[in-house]
């Protein structure tokens, strides 16, 4: 069973449902392996989504840090005004 387009929240909800079923004392042994396999797939999906989000957040923060290091347009205007002022 493939899960290419499932979102994090949906994957987590399905995983929680499977875990509840696995905790039940009357689980059918014939479906146990299938449930565990699906749970493992959902865990991979969730980890992938978390890793992707982490990378994206780091990129955004790095971009903010980069912008902080660059002079703002108002700083550049002040430098221009200073260069041509008649002090």
Image (spheres, helix red, strand yellow):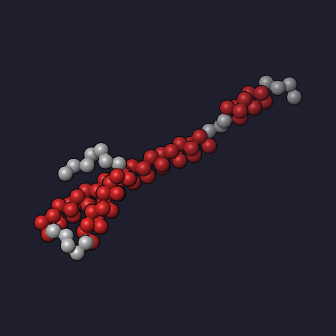
Determine whether, in the image, residue 86 is placed left or right of residue 26.
right
Q: Is residue 1 visible?
A: yes
Q: Residue at x 15, y 68 (%)?
A: 28
Residue farthest to the left? 30
Quarter assignment of residue 76: top right
Q: Is residue 33 above or below residue 57?
A: below
Residue farthest to the bottom? 25
Q: Position of residue 21 (x, y in %)?
A: 26, 66
Q: Position of residue 58 (x, y in %)?
A: 48, 49
Seen from the viewer's position, the closer of residues 15 and 67 is 15
Seen from the viewer's position, the closer of residues 36 and 85 is 36
Quarter assignment of residue 80: top right
Q: Position of residue 62 (x, y in %)?
A: 52, 46
Q: Is residue 44 visible?
A: no
Q: Residue at x 19, y 51 (%)?
A: 1
Determine whether, in the image, residue 74 is placed left or right of residue 1.
right
Residue farthest to the right? 87
Determine whether, in the image, residue 33 is placed left or right of residue 64.
left
Determine whether, in the image, residue 67 is placed left or right of residue 86.
left
Question: Is the C terminus in the top left, top right, bottom left or bottom right quadrant?
Answer: top right
Seen from the viewer's position, the closer of residues 25 and 15 is 25
Q: Position of residue 37 (x, y in %)?
A: 20, 60
Q: Residue at x 25, y 56 (%)?
A: 41
Seen from the viewer's position, the closer of residues 50 and 82 is 50
Q: Is residue 71 above or below residue 37?
A: above
């Amino acid at each position: 069973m493939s899960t290419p387009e499932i979102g994090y929240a949906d994957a987590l909800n399905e995983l929680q449902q499977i875990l509840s079923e696995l905790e039940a004392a009357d689980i059918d042994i014939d479906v146990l392996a299938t449930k565990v396999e699906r749970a493992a797939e959902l865990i991979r999906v969730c980890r992938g989504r978390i890793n992707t989000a982490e990378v994206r957040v780091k990129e955004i923060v790095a971009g903010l840090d980069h912008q902080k290091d660059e002079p703002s347009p108002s700083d550049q205007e002040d430098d221009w005004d200073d260069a041509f002022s008649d002090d």
